[in-house]
Image (cartoon, rainbow, N blue to C red):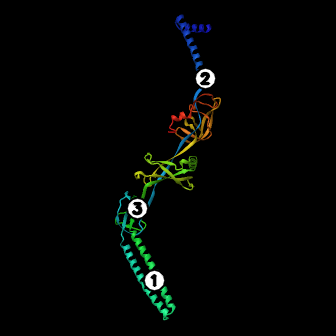
Amino acid sequence: MNSIFNFFALFLKKHTKLSDKMIKSIIITGFIGFIITIQFSCQEGNSQKDGQANLVLPVTTLSTHKTELHRFYVGTVDAVQNVEIRARVQGYLEKIFVDEGKEVQKGQLLFAISDQEYDAEVDRSKAALKTALAESKRSELELDRIRILVEKGVVSKTELQVAQANFEAINAGIARAESALNHAKTRLSYTLIRAPFSGIINRIPFKVGSLISEGTLMTSVSDLQYVYAYFNVSESDYLEYIKNQIENPEDVNKSVKLLLADGSYYPEIGTIETMDGEFKETTGSIAFRAKFKNRNNMLKHGSSGTIKLTNHLNNALIVPQKSTFEIQDKSYVFVLDNNNHVYARSFVPKTRYSDFYIVQSGLNKGDKVVYEGIQKLKEGMQINPQFMTIDSLKSVSSIGK
């Protein structure tokens, strides 16, 4: 130590004009600083080493929970009844008794088509029926006369048989005339078009004076007291729904909500009534039908929305999303063993819900998972766990709300 001191003293004395006292002070001050720097560096290194060995991280124990799983599907809205009103006879449109978008009652008169030729056809059919009836009466009298002559032996029985056949043929003509008259009356009634049920009138494309052909679409009527919402469900979601019904028999009539195009929820709750009997080969999905009460006719036939279907899961194993990381499209968590060493384990998430994943496979109830700070971990590293319950994590998350 004295040799080092003397060396620096001779060096400073040779190359500077400082006094011996100042040279001694500079050397002592520099030596003390050097010692302090080395000591601080050693303490810092030891501190970092201890920090890695005693890293304190929050850990949670996985458990099962009763929760609600929400699924969303694109849906289309149809009126319970929506019928096209078509003309059944040809003619000029004479009157329109309603306006577009108005409510009508069952049997209410909507349109009138010119009826002159159909009225004339009814008159002709009536005249034909009267002629047939008169012919029948004449034939009946002729039959009675010939029957008397046959009894007296004046004419042969063959004459009677001919008269009988003629009478029956004329009576058949009466039936044809009656049928023609009924047909003419029916076609005449088709000139007045009435509402088949109570509902809302849709667009009317024709005006008074338009020539209407048989089969022309005049308008349509929608019964909007209730509406149906149709949506397609994948096979896996369908199985989940059926299993949920078995486990929760009180939820047989599943309630659904309708999210409207403006992002708001329709105030009425719908109920799933039925589903198709087969899956579509092209999409692998099956159609569900839900029924909604249509308050104030707010929903219209042909509109769209999003169906929110809720399934209740009694034993869902959940893991915090913050605990997970991905490597090559696989999900992992760090699991703690009995000696507080951490090891990465892959798992398959069923679905994401709020700040959690519902686990399909790979993890079990009771597994201890590092909650956060996973970016600091390496395989096999030992930590000091600070345990947190899933319930405490749920309280700061939207899950279960």
Residue 307 visible in the current orientation? no
Q: The residue under label 2 is which amino acid type?
A: Asp
**Residue 319, quarter of the rendered image:** top right
Quadrant into which the N terminus falls: top right
Where does label 1 land, which residue? 170
Q: Which mark is residue 106?
A: 3
Secondary element type, mark 3: loop
Q: Which mark is residue 50?
A: 2
Q: The residue under label 3 is which amino acid type?
A: Lys
Dot in front, 2 or 1 = 1
The x, y position of residue 330, in whole percent, is 60, 40
Tell me, yes or no, whether the two marked residues, 2 and 1, touch with CB atoms within 8 Å: no
Q: CA distance from mark 2 to mark 1?
A: 121 Å
**Depicted 79 relative to depicted 244: above or below:** below
Q: Residue furthest top?
A: 20
Q: Residue furthest bottom?
A: 154
The x, y position of residue 317, in whole percent, is 59, 39
Q: The residue under label 1 is which amino acid type?
A: Ile
**Depicted 14 relative to depicted 237: above or below:** above
Which tag, 2 or 3, sits closer to the chain's start? 2
Residue 170 visible in the current orientation? yes
Which tag, 1 or 3, sits closer to the chain's start? 3
Which tag, 2 or 1, sits closer to the chain's start? 2
The x, y position of residue 251, in whole percent, is 53, 48
The residue carrying pointer 1 sits among few (fewer than 14), some (14 to 19) or many (20 or more) residues within 10 Å by Cα, namely many
**Depicted 320 relative to depicted 87: above or below:** above
